[in-house]
Amino acid sequence: MKKLQEGPFDSESEMDPKVRKAFAMVNRFMQGIEPRAKDEGVPDAVYEVLTKLSDEEKKGFLKILKSLTLLTSGNVELVRNYGKGWNPRKSGRWKSVFSNVSGSVATLLGFDINLKVTAEDYKQASMHLDQIANRSNIEFVGRNEHPYASTKPEDIESGKRGDKRDLARYEGEEISTLYRGLNSLPPSVVKYMLTTKNIQLGRACSSSVNPDIAMAFAGKDAISVLFVMKNPNKLGLDAREFSKFELESEIIIKGSLEVETIYLKSFKRYDSPFANSIIKADGQESIFDSANKQKMIEMMELGTRVNDYHLDELGQFAARNFEKGRSLFFVFVGTIK
Amino acid sequence: MKLTKTQIKQIIKEELEQVMNEVELEEQEALREEADASAKQELIDALSQPMK
């Protein structure tokens, strides 16, 4: 597993694996807990994990928490600009940007959530995210790592269930595929995406493990785009339990998407992203050699929603699944590099 | 080799046209690169926004 780094602003040392493990454990032990119970404070298991950390480890944990909080619910532009443009008059307090869970965890770690968020906080978050979002910080947590677990793997019925099976399931699912929806994109941006073979995701791209979240976001307005991103190295920062927008099941990633296949179809909320595509193109083929990529650009130039021009251009048979009035929907399938 | 005035004019005209074409192509290339950079930044900005 790749190791995390704390960032150049305070040390060049690698992050203590205990912090990474504690982060994964808190994420794991928060799952399935009722929102109301979360609002009341951290569960006992999480308390046990956090209180066992040393002061240095607590600082490391807090730094991750603050960075991802500023990215997910702070001012994204300030994170991007390393805090430049920060306005003290508009600055809120940490308690207003932390989710309830993050606020409780931060308090437990000895942080005063009544402090104001400063330009330096944004700068540090920015540098920190640069360091961590393109590395694998996702770690498996077995059921026996729960502070109150019994010493032996339990399965009352078959005796077969245990950490091994959990690990297999975790390896197969969890963050192996991430989804990102985009809407209202200008044709120039989609054209850029069609002409490049590796789409830059930027320093901190918000994605989800839940395809429905990404589809719902993509469908808000034309042109709709969905990234289906294979993540074999489990890169990213798991913000699922800490984000203020918990339902997004958010993972923050950095890097680029090596595009393998592109589909064009009309947007339908509950359709499979790959069903009924009208044009399919090889993502690695040059725009000059790919007639299908050129056709996609041509379709976009005829309008951002399916209209008569599209149908005439494609012909009745080829356009039989292209539903008039619906948003043009591009699906980019690739691997995070 | 002797060149007439008309021939010299023609040569200058052709050379000038060629240079102008090259400049135009370079400008188009620069504009395309600028448009790509702008589109790339716009995409990165959109990707950093949460899906809410």
Image (cartoon, grey):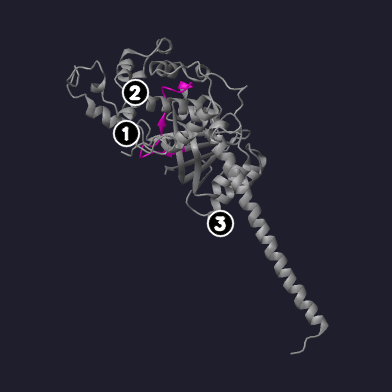
Mark 3, Cα crowd under 10 Å, few <14 / some 14-19 / many 20+, is few
Camera-side residue of A6 and A97: A6
Q: What's the chain of the residue with tag 1?
A: A
> What whole-number distance in Å separates the C-alpha atoms at marks 2 and 1?
35 Å
**Quick check: marks 2 and 1 in contact, CB under 8 Å?**
no
Residue displayed at 27% across by 30% down: A167
Q: Nearer the viewer, residue A311 or A243?
A: A243
Circle 3 residue: A288
Asked if the residues shown at circle 3 and circle 1 are in contact, with their CB atoms under 8 angstroms apart, the answer is: no
Q: State whether residue A191 is above or below residue A204.
A: below
Q: Which residue type does callout 3 highlight?
A: Phe
Mark before the other along the chain sequence, 3 or 1: 1
Can you say whether A26 is above or below B28 in the image? above
Magenta stretch, main secondary structure, is loop
* Callout 3 secondary element: loop
Query: Mark 2 or mark 1: which comes first in sequence?
Result: 2
Q: Secondary structure at mark 1?
A: helix
Q: Which residue is mark 2?
A: A55
What secondary structure is found at the residue carrying circle 2?
helix
User: Disc 2 marks which amino acid?
Assistant: Asp
Q: Is residue A83 magenta?
A: no
Q: Position of residue A196 (x, y in %)?
A: 53, 49
* Marks 2/3: CA–CA distance: 57 Å
Q: Residue at x 58, y 49 (%)?
A: A295
Q: Which residue is mark 1?
A: A172
Query: Seen in the image, is A156 located left or right of residue A216?
Result: left
Q: Position of residue A224 (x, y in %)?
A: 57, 35
